[in-house]
Amino acid sequence: MSLLLAYFNGIAGVVNAPGQIPWPFVAGYFIIALIAAALVAKRQGGLSGFTTLDWVYMGVGGAFAVVWDFYLGSFIGRAIPSTPFFDISFIGRFLITMITVGVVRKFGAGMITTFIFNLLADLFHYGFGGEPVYFVYEALTYGLFFDIMIAVTGGNLFCIEKPYKSKTTTYAVMLIEGAVIGYLYGAVPYSIFWLGFFAPFIYGGVVNWARIYFLLWAYGVSNVPVGAIGAWITYRIAKAVGV
């Protein structure tokens, strides 16, 4: 069984592959998570309009993430083989996105930066086959996880806006938030959403849950500490540029 738009733009539209997450669960999650995060952001104070400078930061961040992921990181990766435990291209993209979002710190920054990254990646590397599914996947997983953190912290991501009186508490909270986003960004989207739904949806095929469980652990091993370190780097950069 396929959807009505099956085979549109290279999308097979498969929704009943063996082991595939049911599509209503995925669609329901995206709708509920997006609305809930926006409501929390409005209540907590992380929901506000973007300035021209914010758009510049997000545009530059998305563009630099593309340059790193497909060119610089790819070149460096020839000397440092990628494994589930360490991927220099992905880690660089993660840190660039984190810094960009940390500088802006407004709900939507994660999704917009990721959307820009995906758009430029399509233009210069992938092509537009499979769209708009990739826009949905990238923005509502990688990007939305950042925005959920912005919503929960009320825009005070990594304690940048309002540090605690105690530096120890500030750094502890910062590192914990970084570790959480490191796991959410680094392990969950590809393992669960891509392998569990979007890959079979676009290309067909069987879902391997043993691989998914392994990657949830393996990607967490590398990206949790990277997220914690990235939070500290983001904090220092945001303070340096005075935002």
Image: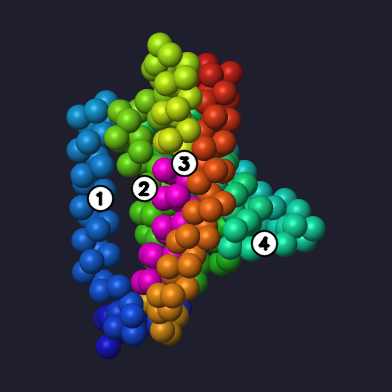
Q: Where residue 25 sits: x, y (%)?
A: 23, 66
- Disc 1 versus disc 3: distance between alpha carbons? 20 Å
- Disc 3 versus disc 2: distance between alpha carbons? 16 Å
> What amino acid type should be assigned to the residue bearing mark 3?
Ala
- Which numbered circle lies on residue 179? 3
49 left or right, relative to 129: left
114 left or right, relative to 141: right
Which dot, 1 or 4, sits closer to the camera? 4
> What amino acid type should be assigned to the residue bearing mark 1?
Ala
Which dot, 1 or 3, sits closer to the camera? 3
Image: magenta residue range: 180-198
| Disc 4 element | loop
Q: Which residue matches tag 4?
A: 82
Instruction: State the residue at coordinates (22%, 36%).
Output: 40
- Dot 4, crowdedness within 10 Å: few (<14), some or many (≥20)? some
| Disc 3 element | helix
Whichever of callouts 3 and 2 sits on the residue coming sooner in the sequence is 2
| 130 to 223, vertically: above or below | below
126 left or right, relative to 201: right
Given residues 13 and 124, the one toward you in this image is 13
31 left or right, relative to 100: left
Q: Quadrant of residue 126?
A: bottom right
Magenta span: helix, strand or loop, mainly? Answer: helix
Q: Where residue 205 sits: x, y (%)?
A: 43, 84
- Which numbered circle lies on residue 33? 1
Which dot, 3 or 2, sits closer to the camera? 3
- Dot 1, crowdedness within 10 Å: few (<14), some or many (≥20)? some
Q: Which residue matches tag 2?
A: 144
